[in-house]
Image (spheres, helix red, strand yellow):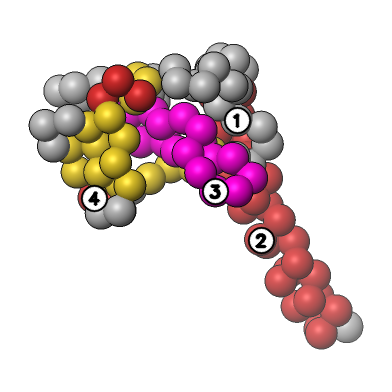
Amino acid sequence: MLRYFARSILIVAPSLFIVSFALAHDSWISRGAFKSPISNEWCCGEGDCFVIPSDSVQMNGVGYELFGVEMVPFTEAMPSPDGAFWRCKRPDGSRRCFFAPPPGS
């Protein structure tokens, strides 16, 4: 009985995390019907967007450097109403949309 309970917890706990994560981004990105300023495609579907920790984003003279490897020009960044950095991706992992907090926030 204890094994069954432990297995259930191992399966249910990650599922709750995934559901809450999906609901967090869908609440404003999906409902806002945001489109990429470059490709004009929808920013996200279910599970396509995630928060980027602010310490993984560096601003330079032309845009945002993500994780030290990806460059997002200022012209491709959209304002993030919740004050967080968000990256939305395609199924192949390439960037669809990027949201950044307004300057000075």
State which tag comes first along the sequence, 3 or 1.
1
Indicate which label's residue lies in the foreground, 3 or 1.
3
Residue named by callout 4: 55
Residue named by callout 2: 14
Question: With 104 as the anchor, is 68 left or right in this view?
Answer: right
Answer yes or no: is residue 58 visible.
yes
Rendered residue at 17%/30% (across/down): 62
Residue 42: x, y in percent?
A: 60, 22
Rendered residue at 67%/61% (across/down): 13
Residue 30: x, y in percent?
A: 61, 23
Q: Which residues are magenta?
A: 85-101
Quadrant of image for the N terminus: bottom right
Q: Residues within 10 Å of mark 2 (few under 14, many from 20)?
A: few
Is-magenta flag for residue 41? Answer: no
Indicate which label's residue lies in the foreground, 2 or 3.
3
Distance, label 2 to label 4, CA atoms, is: 25 Å
Q: Secondary structure at mark 2?
A: helix
Residue named by callout 3: 93
Are the residues at dot 1 and dot 4 in contact (C-beta closer than 8 Å)?
A: no
State which tag comes first along the sequence, 1 or 2.
2
Question: What amino acid type should be assigned to the residue bearing mark 4?
Answer: Asp
